[in-house]
Each structure stands twice: as structure tokens, then as C-alpha cells.
Amino acid sequence: MRTLTLVIYDITDDALRLRVAKFLRFKGLKRIQKSAFIGSLTTSERSNLVAGLRRIVRGHDMVNIQIYPLTEASYRRRVVIGADLTYDEEEEDVIT
Amino acid sequence: MRTLTLVIYDITDDALRLRVAKFLRFKGLKRIQKSAFIGSLTTSERSNLVAGLRRIVRGHDMVNIQIYPLTEASYRRRVVIGADLTYDEEEEDVIT
């Protein structure tokens, strides 16, 4: 069974933040904001994701990552205000 | 009935971002990351929150705000990696 998983992060170090973003994309999650990704994961995929994130940020300060399993209802009932922003894959900057 | 509500935002303009953060705090939400707040809201409080956010960002580009109602189970099952960061109330910068 797959569960929607929302990952939000607050990471001060630019290189580390980029590394986390690339990892999340590699794991099949979709970027929905500069510091937020979402994806549908099995329980074991989510465990692997959490373990990978812990490994990446080990030894770094100023890091906070939060991973929320979401119900389909939560996702359907979300409200989005404003435009979809797109992001440069490498630079992690908003490009439109 | 109150529902946990997660608000995440991606706002390029510094002044507008600060205004949104202050508005969310004023509405009783608690900051959990630089660009993420959470709070327990009634349906009408959530409607008012969404209306207020729409009003604040009207006419601005480069804004994306997402509001997710969360179940208690989603919240309980969240995973947090790293330290709790605290934020300067006015400057919106990480201070610890």
C-alpha cells in the first residue's frame, strides 16, 4: 500500500539543502515548493527515505526535516494559493 | 470540531513573506519551520485563514501557499529529523 508522503525541510547550508532536494527527487518525489516535496511511497520506501535523509544530514546543524504521511482526503482538501512555481533542477532557484 | 492544519509557503518577497508569517502567528498557528506553521482550527477558522491569506498576497507574483488539513494519525506518525530551530519573531531568521 502506498501512502502520500509530504516532506518539508528547513536547511541553512546551501550545498546540503541542494543535496537533500536531489535525493528527494531521486526517490521519486515531486517538488511542490522550494523546500517541500510530495510522493506516494510504500512503508518500506518511506523507511528508506527517512534513513537516507538521516544519513545525509548527519553531523550538520541547522537542519530540520519533517516527513508527514497524508491521507488521500487531506491531499484532496488542500488549498493552494498562488501560482505553481517551477524550479531550476541544479540551482534550486525559482525560475518562473 | 478542530482539525490540525499545516500551512507551507514559498514567497520570494521578503516583506510579503514576513507579513504572511505574522498573520499566521496572529491566527494562533505555531511555527514549525521557517516557512511552515501548524495549528488546530475549526472549519470556519480555516476558511477565514485562507481568505486572509488570499487577501494578503493578492496582486503578488512568486507566491505559493499550500494549506493541508491533517488527521491526528498523520501528525502522530510524522518523523522529525534534526533540531528544533527557533526563529526571531521580527526578522524571520533562524537564531539558534
Image: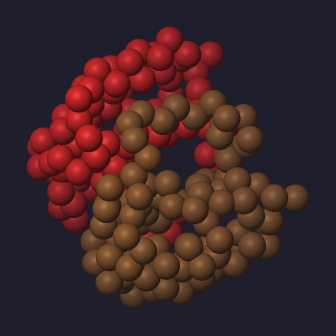
Chain colours: A brown, B red
Which residue is found at the position 62% from the left and 16% from the top? B1
Query: How many marks overall?
Result: 0
Query: Is A67 displayed left or right of B96 in the figure?
Result: right
- Where is residue B95 shown, x and y percent of the image? 18, 61
- Looking at the rendering, in which quadrant would you find the C terminus of chain B? bottom left
- Where is residue B25 shown, x and y percent of the image? 29, 32
Above or below for B17 versus A24: above
Q: Which image quadrant is residue A96 in?
A: bottom left
Question: Who is closer to the viewer here, A67 or B28?
Answer: A67
| Residue A83 visible in the picture | yes
Question: Who is closer to the viewer here, B35 or A61?
Answer: B35
Q: Which image quadrant is residue B20 in?
A: top left
Query: Is B57 displayed left or right of B38 in the figure?
Result: left
Question: Who is closer to the viewer here, A39 or A51?
Answer: A39
| Residue B78 visible in the picture | no
Which residue is found at the position 67% from the left and 35% from the top? A76
Which residue is found at the position 44% from the left and 47% from the top? A84
Above or below for A43 versus B27: below
- Where is residue B61 shown, x and y percent of the image? 26, 41
Question: Who is closer to the viewer here, A63 or B59?
Answer: B59
Outermost residue toward the right in this view: A1
Outermost residue toward the front in this view: A96
Above or below for B76 versus B80: above
Q: Which image quadrant is residue A71 in?
A: top right
Above or below for A8 versus B54: below
Which residue is found at the position 12% from the left and 42% from the top? B15
Query: Is B57 displayed left or right of B93 in the figure?
Result: right
